[in-house]
Amino acid sequence: MAGSGATGVATQIKAINGKCLYTHCKGQALNLAVAESIKSVKCLKGVFEAASEICKLVRKSPKRNVRLNDLKKENQNDSKGIHEFCPTRWTVRGEALDAILNSYYELMNLWDCFLETLSDTIMKARIRSVQKQMPIFDFLFGCSLGILILRQTDNLSKTLQDSRMSAAKGNEIAQDVIKTLSKDRNNNSCNLFWEMVLRRKQYLDVDDPILPRKRRLPRRLEDGNAETRHFPSTPKDHYRQIYLQALDTVTSCIKRRFDQPDFRKYVCLQEIFLKAIKDEPWENGIKEVCSTFWQ
């Protein structure tokens, strides 16, 4: 069985017969893992909400969409166009973020153009909101970080959808993606990413990074001596913490979602069949299979 909607039914079936196996499909597990990790990192959550609003403002208005394309032609910008975020699939949003940054100048000009002619106060407020957010360094940093993470998860999602993909191979590729993301969790990769964002900041004329205001936790949330809590001393330190938190969160979410006990039994069964076909030793895995189905 697969899919989050089947969870309740699967629980009832397993209560009747514990030999039935239940697991989410890997595409759904990946989607849930990415959604959970993005929503857990405040900077990324805010950026995705703003990016989603930008896509809606462009795609749901033929007039704005055509005007944006005209601006891109005038600037000889042949990058991909803006497209809406899928409301349920979080693993196909990397290209949407990339398109927003690649069309940054045209989008800012688009907002100015329509603010002069619009009479709808609600629509003007929505445009002013994204127009105000886009030049802030948090938006640029969050978009760039989202692209870094989603580049890996989007590729994994496409790979898992291959009809020839086996359970064991899909799990193996997921572990490779986790390793790739984990390799980016070091000072050298963080410094390279920071330098890339700063170069893009100068090119796009985005505001300089600043430290957030130092805030003390409510007393009920304090753990030990509040004076010993670490506050970043520079903007780079602050954004380094966000970078590391995002990578830690997405890797831990993927690990947890992909580590399903029943799925491991599927993998074991598959490996036994494949090894038997290839005339390779397969006896080591038979014990786990027998403990499940022949008790």
Image (tube, rainbow, N blue to C red):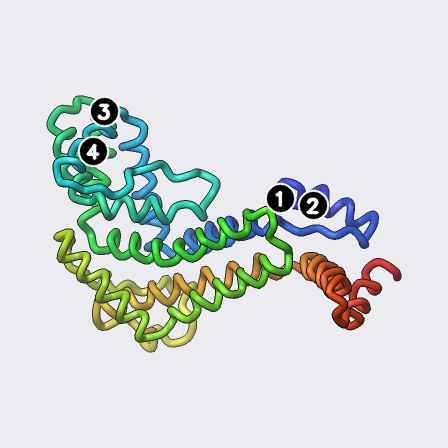
| Residue depicted at 37% across the width and 67% down the height | 244
Viewer-nearest of labels 4 and 1? Answer: 4
In space, the residues marked 3 and 2 are separated at their CA atoms by: 45 Å
Residue 138 as seen in the image, left or right of residue 96 = left
User: Which residue in the rendered view is the most extreme toward the right?
Assistant: 295
Seen in the picture, residue 83 relative to 48 is either above or below; the reply is above
Amino acid identity at mark 1: Gly
User: Which residue in the rendered view is the most extreme toward the front?
Assistant: 278
Residue 166 lies, in percent from the top left, at: 63, 55
- Tell me the residue that label 2 is attached to: 1
Residue 202 as seen in the image, left or right of residue 237 = left
Residue 68 lies, in percent from the top left, at: 20, 33
Question: Badges 2 and 1: C-beta atoms under 8 Å apart?
Answer: yes
The answer to which of marks 3 and 1 sits earlier in the sequence is 1
- Tell me the residue that label 4 is attached to: 68
Amino acid identity at mark 3: Lys
**Few, some or many C-alpha atoms within 10 Å of disc 1 (few <14, some 14-19, many ≥20)?**
some
Question: Badges 3 and 2: C-beta atoms under 8 Å apart?
Answer: no
Amino acid identity at mark 2: Met
The answer to which of marks 4 and 3 sits earlier in the sequence is 3
Residue 3: which disc?
A: 1
**Few, some or many C-alpha atoms within 10 Å of disc 4 (few <14, some 14-19, many ≥20)?**
many
